[in-house]
Image (cartoon, rainbow, N blue to C red):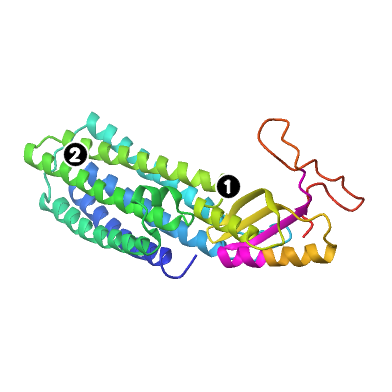
Amino acid sequence: MSASGGTRAIFAALAANIGIAITKFGAYLLTGSASMLAEAIHSVADSGNQGLLLLGGRRAQREATPQHPFGYGRERYIYAFIVSIVLFSLGGLFALYEAYHKLAHPEPITRFQWVPVAVLLVAIAMESFSFRTAMKESNQIRGGQSWVRFIRRAKAPELPVVLLEDTGALVGLVFALFGVGMTLATGNGKWDALGSAMIGVLLVVIAIVLAVETKSLLVGEGAEPKDLAAIEQAVTAGPEVERIIHMKTLYLGPEELMVAVKVAVSACETAEDVARGIDAVEARIRSAVPIAGVIYVEPDIYRAAADRAGTGAVAGPEPEAGPDETPGRSRS
C-alpha cells in the first residue's frame, strides 16, 4: 500500500475515531443514552477496522515464497473483508440489540442533558475532517468515475472502506442527534432507542455492501476494460504475433496484475525467433500497463477451422504434453 493516499486516509480516520470513541463513552456514562452507546461502539469498531487495514497493508508487502509464489498482495482484500464482518457484528448488531433493549425499557435523558448534543456536534466536526481527507485522497485516483463506480471498481480496498465508514459515521451521528434531540424534547426514551435502531440498520447495510464488493476481489477480478484494450493492443502491435487466441487477466493484489495470453505465431518461425518475439510482447505489455507484473505468453499455431460449437474461429486442440511438460503450461 502506498504511503500516500490510502494510508493517509486511514491514519486520519483512526485519529478521529479514537478521539470520538473516548468522548462518546464519557457522554454515555454521564447520560445513559442508548444512541450515545451505539455510536461509541461504532467508533470503537471503526478504530479497530482502521487498525486491520493497516495490518493488512503491512502483511501484503511480504516477499513471495515457494508456498505463495505470487506474493501476499491479496491479504489486503482479506483484511478488508474482516472489516465488513466487524462492522456488521460489533457495530450494526450491537446497535440493534441496544435499540431493542431500550425500546423494552425506555429511559429519558435526565442527567447532563447538554452533554450528548455537544459531543455529537464535536464528533460531526471530527468525522467531517476524516471524510474530507478520504475524499481528497480518492479524487487523486478516481478520475472521471462516479463515487458509486469508484467504490465498486477500485482494486485497492482501503479508500472505499474508509469512505463508506466515514459516510456511515456521519449519517449515524445525524441519527444519534435526532434520537437524543427528540428524547430531550419529549422526555420519551423511545426516540433514543429509535436513533440506535437507525444506526444499527445503517451499519448493517454498509457492512453488507463492503462484504459483497470485497468478496468479488477475493474471488478474483480481471483487468478493467481500458487495461484489457491496452494489453490487446500491445500484444498485436508488432509483427511477432498474428493474433490473440485467448487471454486471461487476474489481480494478484491491488497493484499487481497477472496476464496470461495465448498467441498465434507463424509456423515457419524458428524457436529463437519465437522467444525473441515473446520478449518483445512482454515488454510492450509492461509499457502499456505497468502493473502487469506477471506475464505468461504461450505461442501456438492458429487453426483457421470454425469452432464446432458455433462460437467462431478458435485454436485447435492443445498439443500433447511431452515427458517433461504439463498440458497448458506456458512455454515462455
Q: How many marks?
A: 2
Q: Residue at x 37, y 53 (%)?
A: 145
Could you tell me which quadrant the C terminus lies in? bottom right
* Residue 213 horizontal side relative to residue 325, left or right: left
Q: Is-magenta flag for residue 319?
A: no
Query: Of helix, strand and loop, which one carries label 2?
Result: helix
Rendered image quadrant of residue 285: bottom right
Residue 166 pos. (x, y %): 31, 53
Q: Is residue 142 above or below residue 174?
A: below
* Residue 31 horizontal side relative to residue 44, left or right: left
Question: Do the CB atoms of the residues marked 2 and 1 lie less than 8 Å apart?
Answer: no
How far apart marks 2 and 1 lie (CA) works out to 43 Å
Q: Residue at x 51, y 62 (%)?
A: 57
Query: Of helix, strand and loop, which one carries label 1?
Result: loop
Type of amino acid under label 1: Gly
Q: Residue furthest left?
A: 185
Residue 161 pos. (x, y %): 40, 53
Camera-side residue of 214 and 231: 231
The image's mark for residue 192 is 2
Rendered image quadrant of residue 127: bottom left
Inspect this view and state whether residue 71 appears.
no
Q: Is residue 123 above or below residue 197?
A: below
Q: Is-magenta flag for residue 294?
A: yes
Q: Which callout, 2 or 1, points at the residue further toward the start of the chain?
A: 2
In front: label 2 or label 1: 1
Residue 227 pos. (x, y %): 53, 56
Q: Which residues are magenta?
A: 282-303
Residue where numbered disc 1 is placed: 220
Q: Residue at x 12, y 51 (%)?
A: 112
